[in-house]
Image (cartoon, helix red, strand yellow):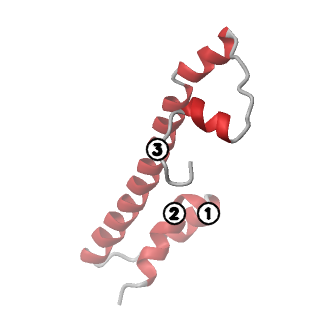
Amino acid sequence: MHGEVMKGKEVTKKARIDAEPLSYKEGLALINEATLTAVVAALAVYRANKLIKTAEIAAAMSLQASNCIVDAFEEVHRARPRSIEGFLKQDKGRT
C-alpha cells in the first residue's frame, strides 16, 4: 500500500475495506483455469496473426523473385477480398 509491502489483511484494515467471506463457488472460480485458458487462447490468436503476415510476406517475395504477374490474383481478390488483401499490399511495394 503506497509503495509499502504489506499483508492483504493489513491493507484491508488500513483502507477500511470489509472483506466478504467467499463461498465455495467464488473460491473455485479463483482457482480454476479459466484465466489460464483465456491467456492461452489470446496467445494462439496473436501467433496465428503473426503467422498469416509472415506467410503473406513469403508469398509476395516468392512471386517477386519469380517475376510473376499479380494481376491474375485480382479475380480472387474480387471474390474474397479479405483472403488476399495483405498479399496485394506487400506486392504494391515492389519495383
> Residue 86, position in %: x, y?
49, 67
Distance (Cα) linking label 1 and label 3:
55 Å
Query: Of callouts 2 and 3, which one flags the residue occurring earlier in the amino acid sequence?
Result: 3
Q: Name the image quarter holding residue 55.
A: bottom left
Name the residue type under label 2: Ile
Name the residue type under label 3: Val
Determine whether 26 is above or below 15 in the image.
above
**Is 69 or 34 nearer to us in this picture?**
34
Q: Residue 84 has which mark? A: 2
**Is 10 or 71 nearer to us in this picture?**
10
Taking the spot 37% from the left edge, 85% from the top edge, the residue there is: 94
Taking the spot 41% from the left edge, 84% from the top edge, the residue there is: 93
Crowding around mark 1 (Cα neighbors within 10 Å: few <14, some 14 to 19, many 20+) is few
Distance (Cα) linking label 2 and label 1:
6 Å
- Residue at disc 2, secondary structure: helix
> Residue 30, position in %: x, y?
58, 23
Determine whether label 1 and label 3 are within 8 Å by CB.
no
Left or right, 15 with reference to 5: right
Q: Nearer the viewer, mark 2 or mark 3?
A: 3
Report the residue marked by disc 1: 81
Taking the spot 70% from the left edge, 11% from the top edge, the residue there is: 23
The residue positioned farthest toward the top in the image shown = 24
Quadrant the C terminus occupies: bottom left
Determine whether 10 is above or below 28 in the image.
below
